[in-house]
Image (cartoon, helix red, strand yellow):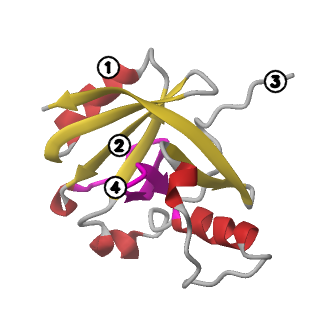
Amino acid sequence: METVTTLNLPYDIYGIDNPVNFVDLNNKLFCTFTTLEALDDLVNSLTHSYTIMYNKIFVLEVKDNNEYVLTYNIEMANIAHIPENTILVHRKKESNTLYTINALNELIKKLNGGIVDTRYQIDWQHYRNTILLTQQNELRQLKTKIYKIIEL
């Protein structure tokens, strides 16, 4: 059986594929997928190419495979291009859940009998330390743990 990784897969990239949406990036969280071998080079590239807000990069390990995820904020005025293998995510602080808007809609549909209702209350504790993504219109949940926090 072929191992499927997150890298280079067509996850929803809400807001990134259309440059018009760049004005809405001020407080958006970026999520870049990488391997352990490429981690140091990626951090070096990010810190030389962008001003990282809050001077922190969080490195998460995806528990089910050999992938790592860097999460960070970039100053809006500093964006010339979006790094490869990067998506925009939102975060629920109380459960440390990262999610895309498309994944949130798919989760609500799954939990609410196929109906997307923006008033639907999600118990975020069920998704603690998880990244919620869509891949080929399917909800995917990646369980994570903190690998390290890089202070810049």
Is residue 82 in view from this perspective?
Answer: no
At x 67%, y 49%, the residue is: 140
Percent from the top left, x then y, of residue 25?
A: 30, 66
Tell me the SS state at disc 4: strand
According to the picture, the residue beneath numbered tag 4 turns out to be: 29
Q: Quadrant of residue 49?
A: top left
Q: Magenta stretch? A: 79-100
Q: CA distance from mark 4 to mark 2?
A: 7 Å
Amino acid type shown at disc 3 = Glu
- Residues 134 and 45: in front is 134
Q: Quadrant of the N terminus?
A: top right
Q: Earlier in the sequence, mark 1 or mark 2?
A: 1
Q: CA distance from mark 1 to mark 2?
A: 14 Å
Q: Earlier in the sequence, mark 3 or mark 1?
A: 3
According to the picture, the residue beneath numbered tag 1 turns out to be: 40
At x 61%, y 62%, the residue is: 103
Say few, some or many: other residues with alpha carbon within 10 Å of mark 1 (under 14 / 14 to 19 / 20 or more): few
Percent from the top left, x then y, of residue 57?
A: 26, 37
Residues at discs 4 and 2 in contact (Cβ within 8 Å): yes
Percent from the top left, x then y, of residue 28?
A: 32, 62
Percent from the top left, x then y, of residue 111?
A: 71, 68
According to the picture, the residue beneath numbered tag 2 turns out to be: 71
Tell me the SS state at disc 1: helix
